[in-house]
Image (cartoon, rainbow, N blue to C red):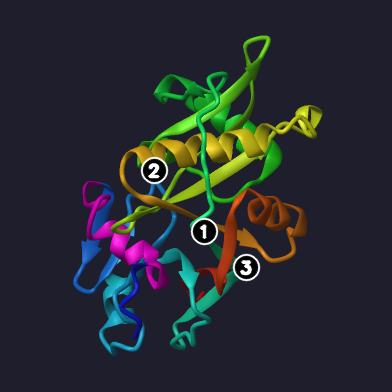
């Protein structure tokens, strides 16, 4: 089992900075359902892990290695992606046109997520960290924010732009702005991307990120 926090970011985030947003049963831990669908355990090779997951929840989203499930669990979906980390040349900046999003903006954030599908986002996901956006004539048209935060790192997530406003550099400006907030706090930035999203991966590489490792995204549930 690797000791690097980014090899098990959900676990390290939930036992640390996001402990107050977690629910735990023995060796299993997850975000509160209204915050996020993700969870995990310290070591999936531990025989007690799945018993504790079963006592905690009947479904869970995971980021990490490909798992072999016990017979009473099944995959709801699976996908392959990459984990990317900032390089030493990464130079984030804050765009003064970006606005800080709050609980009052959640209905618009959920609407934007529903139309752009950047990944799982719940009604209180914004409480995981700072979320920034761009508005056009008062309407939220792009956003990005923070998700998991294992010690020393913070994930940039929910990067999305209204289809009518793409091609204006909003994603780049928001990623760099969120990263500047993360750096100001003393953390480094990382992110995940689906491996088929070549355009996003190339953008992140151009901004100063590099692929650290391949990951598996999955949702598991108790077998019916």
Assess whether residue 9 is covered by the magenta stretch: yes
Which element type, helix, strand or loop, lies under badge 2?
A: helix
Q: Which residue is mark 1?
A: 87
Image vertical order of residue 110 relative to residue 151, above or below: above
Span shown in magenta: 6-20
In terms of secondary structure, what is the magenta stretch mainly?
A: helix
Q: Is 165 situated left or right of 191 in this image?
A: right
**Residue at the location (28% across, 58% down)?**
151
Could you say which is closer to the camera, residue 191 or residue 181? 181
Q: Classify mark 2: residues with Cα within 10 Å, few (<14), some (14-19) or many (20+).
A: some
Q: Secondary structure at mark 3?
A: strand
Residue 32 lies within the magenta run: no
In the rendered image, the vertical position of residue 157 relative to residue 135, given as above or below? below
Residue 61 picture location, percent across and down:
47, 63
Q: Bin the neighbour count of mark 1 within 10 Å (Cα to Cα): few under 14, some 14-19, many 20 and up.
A: some
| Residue 81: image tag | 3
Q: Marks 2 and 1, Cα distance to the nearest angstrom?
A: 13 Å
Instruction: State the quadrant of the N terminus.
Output: bottom left
2 and 1 marks in contact (CB < 8 Å): no
Image x and y of residue 147, in percent = 43, 48
Q: Which residue is identified by label 2?
A: 183
Q: Position of residue 193 (x, y in %)?
A: 62, 59
Give the side of residue 68 with respect to residue 27, left or right: right
User: Which tag, 1 or 3, sits closer to the chain's start?
Assistant: 3
């Amino acid at each position: 089992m690797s000791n690097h926090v980014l090899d098990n970011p959900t676990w390290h985030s939930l036992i640390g900075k996001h402990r107050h947003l977690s629910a735990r049963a023995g060796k299993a831990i997850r975000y509160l359902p209204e915050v996020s669908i993700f969870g995990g355990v310290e070591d999936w090779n531990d025989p007690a892990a799945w018993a504790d997951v079963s006592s905690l929840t009947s479904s869970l989203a995971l980021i990490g290695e490909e798992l072999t499930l016990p017979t009473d669990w099944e995959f709801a979906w699976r996908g392959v992606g990459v984990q990317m980390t900032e390089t030493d040349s990464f130079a984030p900046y804050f765009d003064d046109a970006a606005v800080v999003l709050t609980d009052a903006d959640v209905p618009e954030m959920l609407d934007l997520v529903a139309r752009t599908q950047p990944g799982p986002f719940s009604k209180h996901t914004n409480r995981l960290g700072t979320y920034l956006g761009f508005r056009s004539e008062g309407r939220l048209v792009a956003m990005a924010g923070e998700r998991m935060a294992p010690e020393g790192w913070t994930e940039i997530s929910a990067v999305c732009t209204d289809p009518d406003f793409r091609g204006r550099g909003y994603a780049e400006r928001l990623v760099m702005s969120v990263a500047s907030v993360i750096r100001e706090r003393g953390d480094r930035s990382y992110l995940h991307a689906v491996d088929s999203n070549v355009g996003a991966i190339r953008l992140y590489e151009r901004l100063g990120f590099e692929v650290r490792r391949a990951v598996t995204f999955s949702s598991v549930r108790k077998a019916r």
